[in-house]
Image (spheres, coloured by chain):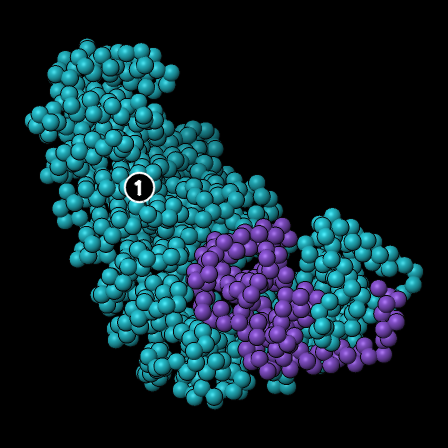
Amino acid sequence: NRNERRRIGRGKLRLQKWYVALSDTQKKKISREVIQMVLARKPKMCSFLEWRDLKIVYKRYASLYFCCAVEDQENELITLEIIHRYVELLDKYFGSVCELDIIFNFEKAYYILDEFILGGEAQETSKKIVLKAIEQADMLQEEAEAPRSVLEEIGLT
Amino acid sequence: MPAVSKGDGMRGLAVFISDIRNCKSKEAEIKRINKELANIRSKFKGDKALDGYSKKKYVCKLLFIFLLGHDIDFGHMEAVNLLSSNKYTEKQIGYLFISVLVNSNSELIRLINNAIKNDLSSRNPTFMCLALHCIANVGSREMAEAFAGEIPRILVAGDTMDSVKQSAALCLLRLYKTSPDLVLMGEWTSRVVHLLNDQHMGVVTAAISLITCLSQKNPDEFKTCVSLAVSRLSRIVSSASTDLQDYTYYFVPAPWLSCKLLRLLQCYPPPEDGAVKGRLVECLETILNKAQEPPKSKKVQHSNAKNAILFEAIALIIHYDSEPNLLVRACNQLGQFLQHRETNLRYLALESMCTLASSEFSHEAVKTHIETVINALKTERDVSVRQRAADLLYAMCDRSNAKQIVAEMLSYLETADYSIREEMVLKVAILAEKYAVDYSWYVDTILNLIRIAGDYVSEEVWYRVIQIVINRDDVQGYAAKTVFEALQAPACHENMVKVGGYILGEFGNLIAGDPRSSPLVQFNLLHSKFHLCSVPTRALLLSAYIKFINLFPETKTTIQEVLRCDSQIRNSDVELQQRAVEYLKLSSIASTDVLATVLEEMPPFPERESSILAKLKKKKGPGAVSNELEEGKREGGELNGAGERPGDSSSTPSPSADLLGLRSAAPVSAAPPSAGSLLVDVFSEAGPAAPAASVNDDGFLRFVCKNNGVLFENQLLQIGIKSEYRQNLGRMYLFYGNKTSVQFVSFTTTLNVQLKPVDPLVEGGAQVQQVINIECITDFSEAPILNIKFRYGGALQNLSLKLPVTINKFFQPTEMASNDFFQRWKQLSQPQQEAQKIFKANHAMDTEVIKAKLLGLGTALLDKVDPNPENFVCAGVIQTKSQQVGCLLRLEPNAQAQMYRLTLRSSKDTVSKRLCDLLAEQF
């Protein structure tokens, strides 16, 4: 029942995913509010925050914060590990992931998320299986794009 | 540019992103984006047909621009075109765009659904998954309509790939959440439940989320899942850490699945089958045992995963609340966590212990941790953890430790965070009252409370201390002495002045014997605070002064002088001026006897539920409005009234009479001779036996949200209703109009409780009136039935009508802010406290009409509380004689689907249910 998950770098939203239907303005407002709250937290504070009728579970990795808003009765610790597993997946895929990877390959970050979590619930918690699915997709992608030359690329930008 | 751009062929996109990142200013960024948008627009509009690759690239750029926070108003068509590409990568970008930027443009939705349909039937698992992901991400009603029938088939089909099954399960879950009416499991139920037995752990993990959600709504249909879940859990719990290969997470076997299994079991009572139950208890014991084993890894992931399962197991143990042994073990385990170095664990342990404290089996065990919890309250650096500690102290408080806990909470209050002070104050006040053995301790506590956190002491708290002092003569002298001492402080809080003014005005005589607190000293002390106080407090002090004149004739001249001075008698505030003038007159004209009668000591307050408890309930959940508000304020008003009619001894303050709430009931023009008037305890009898046959309730539902109108009409008779309600009382006027020109004879009405007869004759064209007084004793769902019999031209007419007296009539609206609302909402999270209905709109979905109806319901319509402005939230308290029931309401319209979701939460399950039933018919 994850309502949203997003990562923030220095107050900037890098990736967001919503599992409930909301208007764009509402999404922006909620994002702002949550970012403010999470950035105000000091290290060593607990990773759970009450917010409206939800709980925010967050974890910081270097300059990136990963947050999930979950319903009240959700298990906080397992949500923290959902975040960690996602970071592991990114890390494994990109090879020590950094903020730039997520910015430049945002579509990949989305695919990985969709393979891992769907509709707010864990779909596949095995790291191997998720990565295999993504790699297979990449294979399909490369096959399709092999014939395209670099010159053509530049011409098209 | 980063070195890694794995599998990515879109160089143009990377260049564009780099450009954006290199922009020095916001303006430059916008300029670059606008340039790109213009470029893409011209490409899309151009004559030359774009190839799939270019389309993909541009759509991807648009997506990036959107994610930066800019609006995108084109490109949807191109994205939809990509869906039908047979190149995976193009399709993928198309789906991503649709998922992120879906637009309920019906034209497009049809095209999108078409593309999805093709992919679902493609038998290509990768394409099927993409399509299912898209449905799950968008989850719109149109998609539910198109695919809710197809997906269960895919989910249970023998030849479906595992990955597709997983997507299908969660996709179905999402659709069920948006449109439960469209997702019909029926024939699939048992096969879905059996997915819990699937060999593939991923399939089980995905399916269990679906099964849990379905079980919550239809527990009976899915109850076979209990034994399957127990055996699955048992297999996981007893497996070695390596057995489950990649599903082992940091040496913990399948933590996600374990948590979900334990969560699913929480939808059900303990298994009835002894063997299943034994196996489950064994699992829970194993989980508790494992917590004691040394960790297999130092990594926080290991302990988090392990403890996630542990907390979920404890939640299940608490849910069952039937295994004393397990409850105590759980409590001990949590006790260890209270001192853990991980803040997260301390937080969760405090939170979880709070629920344990309310179980009779573990209450004592929880109490043993009192020192640790007090220590947490003092030393935790994170306010959210301290808040949990305060909650737990409150929950574990009983007669044996109340003094200690109250003292600790008081001392914590001195430094407490502003955000939690008010709630702390209420908690202290409640504990002090609830567990007061001697009332001097109670008085001390409350006065301390005012001293330490006066700003956060709400009206209810000081009203309550006054009520208690007035009702208990053993504490009055002590209270007068203590409050007198407290007022000596150079700076004391205005609330202290209020309490002081009231108590000294009533009981100052009890300490007047001591020269240190002689009448004049008392008066001077009070008056020294006068000028620093707000108008309401000054008004209260003026009343105290006139009481002084009565209690101590020797203060009369001093006080009269004060009243006479310009700053009082010509005060620009009307209330103050009026009091000064009237009190001055009263003191000079009235004889001592009259004065003594007018200013007689306050009679005891009727004992009822503490208003502060109600207030805390209001803050914490079962909302409740304090009706004592009136009582506290009465003091000034009554005296004021007395002043206007000096010498009229009948105006002695008689507070309890008008507290019954009928004070301002519309003037009852002494009921016409034909009208029966009788206080009918309509609801005290358990379920009045309603005549089963032919009760007319056509009109009934129309009155849920309104009080006046025509209840019934046929060719002969029209019955109109006017009604008014106040707190737990109501009065209903029934008007029987004879529409014919012939008289009705033998006209009788009977309610399925007693009712005084109406005039047996109703003249042609005439109307008779009947008044029914109603008192709500307790909550109810059956409406009273009114039987009407009369003869019209010889023929006997017989009518049975449901009287529109519904539980919501006894609503008192409650205003509250968003935070409060959700906090209370959360407090009412037990499944039985909630009632929910999803229904089709019967009327046009007009916001104003909905608002009017919700207001008519009697609740307060809360603005800007729900993050979604389309939704309506309301709060109110149902007043019955025996209790107050706080109710919260949320109505979520879905204009597209012409559906509503209505959720009611209240502290009483029958109330939630009844309100939900009543209201679901109104929109």
Q: Position of residue A27 (x, y in %)?
A: 60, 54
Q: Which residue is mark 1?
A: B453
Whether residue A157 sits left or right of residue B215 in the image: it is right
Q: Which chain is purple?
A: A
Q: Residue at x 14, y 34 (%)?
A: B481
Q: Which chain contains the residue that carries disc 1?
A: B
Q: Residue furthest left?
A: B513
Report the front residue among B649 and A68: A68
> Relative to B472, is A59 above or below?
below
Q: Position of residue B358 (x, y in %)?
A: 28, 62
Q: Residue at x 85, y 59 (%)?
A: B44
Picture quadrant where residue B390 is located: bottom left
Q: Considering the numbered disc 1 on the image, is that residue within a helix, a strand or a loop?
A: helix
Q: Which chain is cyan?
A: B
Picture quadrant where residue A107 is located: bottom right
Q: Position of residue B737 (x, y in %)?
A: 44, 33
| Viewport quadrant of the N terminus of chain B | bottom right
